[in-house]
Image (tube, grey):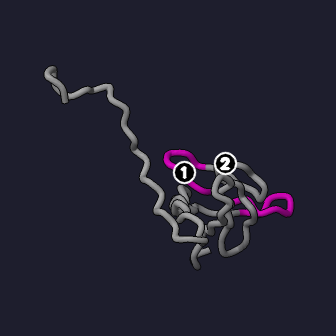
């Protein structure tokens, strides 16, 4: 602070410093980002031309999805009678949306 008040334009460091490692050790890596929950709600499914089509909701939209469809950052890997598997492509993490037993 100077006579005119705090310096509002002073450089700031917002990044946490790395924890120093002991001799012969690598510094600690930052924790992996959390995996967000799937933003989809299951509505139903049907067979069309020998392929399963799933009806899912995403916010106010209703989507018809097949295996291989892309919804960045998600890709539909497979759809079965009990659920569907998504790949979060940015995090390379598989997530499952189970359909339940009412089908």
**Residue picked out by circle 2:** 71
**Percent x, y for residue 84?**
68, 67
For the point 52% across and 60% down, the residue is 30
Q: Position of residue 86 (x, y in %)?
A: 67, 62
Q: Residue at x 71, y 55 (%)?
A: 75
Any magenta on residue 51? yes
Residue 70 in the image, given as x and y percentages of width and height: 72, 49
The answer to whether mark 2 and mark 1 are in CB contact below 8 A is yes
Q: Residue furthest top?
A: 4
Residue holding disc 1? 58
Q: Main secondary structure of the magenta part?
A: strand
Residue most extreme to the left: 3
Q: Which residues are magenta?
A: 46-62
Alpha carbon separation for disc pair 2 and 1: 11 Å
Element type at mark 2: strand
In the image, what residue occupies the spot 56% across and 57% down?
Answer: 40
């Amino acid at each position: 602070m100077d006579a005119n008040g705090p310096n509002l334009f002073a450089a700031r460091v917002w990044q946490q410093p790395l924890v120093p490692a002991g001799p012969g050790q690598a510094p600690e890596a930052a924790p992996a980002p959390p995996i967000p929950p799937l933003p989809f709600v299951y509505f139903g499914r049907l067979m069309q031309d020998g392929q399963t089509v799933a009806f899912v909701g995403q916010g106010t939209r209703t989507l018809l999805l097949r295996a291989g469809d892309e919804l960045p950052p998600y890709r539909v890997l497979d759809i079965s009678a009990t659920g569907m598997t998504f790949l979060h492509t940015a995090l390379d993490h598989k997530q499952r949306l189970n359909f339940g037993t009412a089908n």
